[in-house]
Image (cartoon, rainbow, N blue to C red):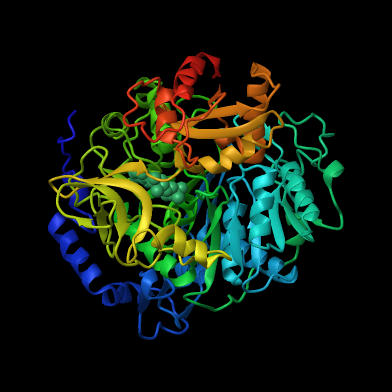
Amino acid sequence: MSASDIYPPPSEVSINAHINSYEKYKELYDKSVQEPSEFWGEIANSFYWRVPPPPPFLRYNFDVTKGDIFIEWMKGGVTNICYNVLDRNVHDKKLGDKVAFYWEGNEPGDSMSITYSELLGKVCQFANVLRAQGVKKGDRVSIYMPMVIELVVAMLACARIGAIHSIVFAGFSAESLCERILDSHCSLLITADGFYRGDKLINLKRIADDALKKCTEKNHPLGKCIVLRHLGRDDSVCDGTNKTSPPCKRPCPDMQTMWNPSRDQWWHDLIKDVSLECEPEWCDAEDELFILYTSGSTGKPKGVVHTVGGYMIFTATTFQYVFDYHQDDVYWCTADIGWITGHSYLTYGPLANGATSVLFEGLPIYPDISRMWQIIDKYNVSKFYTAPTAIRLLMKYGDEPVERYSRKSLKVLGTVGEPINPEAWLWYYNVVGGKRCPIVDTFWQTETGGHVLTPLPGATVTKPGSATFPFFGVVPAILNESGEELEGEAEGYLVFKQPWPALMRTVYGNHQRFETTYFKKFPGYYVTGDGCKRDSDGYYWITGRIDDMLNVSGHLLSTAEVESALVEHSSVAEAAVVSHPHPVKGECLYCFVTLRDGHEFTKTLSDQLKNLVREKIGPIATPDYIQNAPGLPKTRSGKIMRRVLRNIAKNDRDLGDISTLADTSVINQLFENRCQTVH
Ligand code: WTA
């Protein structure tokens, strides 16, 4: 394959596509960027507004030299996103009996489905519960749950009453959960007893308890915790005490020993006899909808804030066009709801379109390596959205496990999370999609709320590894180090020149950090932090992060965050973390540690350090390599030269210019010590 290979949209897809040619895309695109208010105004009209957005439809300032950065879409318009994604589907579009989600559990055979009317009822009921618990508009609610329908119920219930949800991925540690609860001053936590990941029990309530204990120690005691009984769901089989006969094959955590009666309440007790109807809280389009934390280069996660109106119309529109959604589709996004992809393209976007989705709790290769393809056939999935890391993992097992299943229902395949290498792209296209299905390589970020660079399946000629062109309303540019816009074929910083409706509005509680992180380096532009190439045909190719961030299995981590976890160990004086290529994860963590005097580098120490990072951040951040580094390569001003460390990690002696290095002798020592690396 050469990078010049191209894949035109298959005619079977184009023929019925919403956007069926490049010309049609271009016509709409030009309108969307030249007349954004008119373009998005027409789209907004198809939603329910208690008070339609008054002019001006859009106000913003992207230039720090001209004042505060702000972005406002449809301010003064009054609506409710939960009403739009549920009530409108049930009452106006008569989709009440349509399945909203097929839930597929960790164990094959453990499954259920829920229709739009049932989901609406459950959301209203839980919204009433939250109100009864004293949750009001604008309050922050932390959600720490496995991939279950109730996670969707909890988030939509918050949205219904105007509370701001802050979902924390259930793979994060107690420390990370505590940090996020404190940062957003949450008043209530919703969690579950536990769940299984493959055959491993995750004792979620115990981790949540640890987090709440830490919150209390830091003077933010949380008075309320609602606990879903997920593992011991079926009372007739399991009562949550593990004393049933016959004994349960999958034991639950013993909830009684960790129950705090003055704080903890069971979800199922709270919903008893509660009404299935609930009047929504009518919100301004610019009211905050949710906070979602993403890694920041200083090490402290940033609370990315999205608002009701813009996020609603943008996720709905991108979902419709990027997956070329039609009413008879069955859509499956494998992302966890704890990440932005799960917010935008498992929850709000699909529901706004009245789509039927698969919500999968389990792992791609459990209990066997064909699980994904088996699920695709089971539900006749037509639109499938996953991450390059999952594709690379599945690719390792060859074509046979895929070919055991027909996958004939598939029409469009999507990827997100990191650059996809052409080899994985081609395997996805040739083997998974049987050369019939276009691939949409969607580039976006927690901050962008939805897809910003992406092919459209019926219109765009794709090139493996390229996210192709901007979505409607998005104006990209490539800048050089001096901030000049580069024309034509070029490589540099990827920035955006004007807002689209779902661009983040602020960093929760720290607007200055928002301005500094995204708008200060190049005034007048939103800076993504990614490098990008534009080829001679105008295609965009993301080259990866250019800040101190790395992308492990599609999850962003900051090197600073991992370094500060490592130096908490009493043997470690200093740590420097760099990204290192990994065949499945894309990138992994390679850590250099300088020990305090008198401490010895051993396998035990290396294991302890790996565990420490797991505990502090979560399993996704577990380092692959720890190397003993008696000294670190630093510039005369004391800045660690990560570029050099990346080369040492790869055993690449071509170090380029190292004239700014204060002490070159450390380099040889680090190359020699590579054998003292514990993998
Ligand atoms: C990377 C995930 C190349 C990129 C939705 C970005 C990608 C970061 C792609 C955001 C893609 C995401 N091609 N790189 N298709 N999609 N990225 O906030 O570095 O978890 O800045 O949002 O992932 O990660 P986040």
- Residue 105, image quadrant: top right
Is 544 in front, or is 385?
544
Left or right for 376, reference 208: left
- Residue 421 visible (yes or no): yes
- Residue 453 visible (yes or no): no
- Residue 668, image quadrant: top left
Tell me if residue 189 comes above or below residue 371 in the rendering: below
Q: Position of residue 396 (x, y in %)?
A: 40, 22
Image quadrant for the N terminus?
top left
Q: Position of residue 231 (x, y in %)?
A: 70, 41
Is 193 in front, or is 303?
303
Left or right for 669, reference 206: left
Residue at image point 79% right, 41% down: 240
Q: Position of residue 352 (x, y in %)?
A: 43, 63
Left or right for 591, reference 63: right
Is 424 in front, or is 593?
593
Residue at image point 81% right, 34% down: 242
Left or right for 108, reference 418: right
Q: Position of residue 29 (x, y in %)?
A: 21, 64
Residue at image point 35% right, 77% down: 45
Image quadrant for the C terminus?
top right
Tell me if residue 251 comes above or below residue 94 in the rendering: above
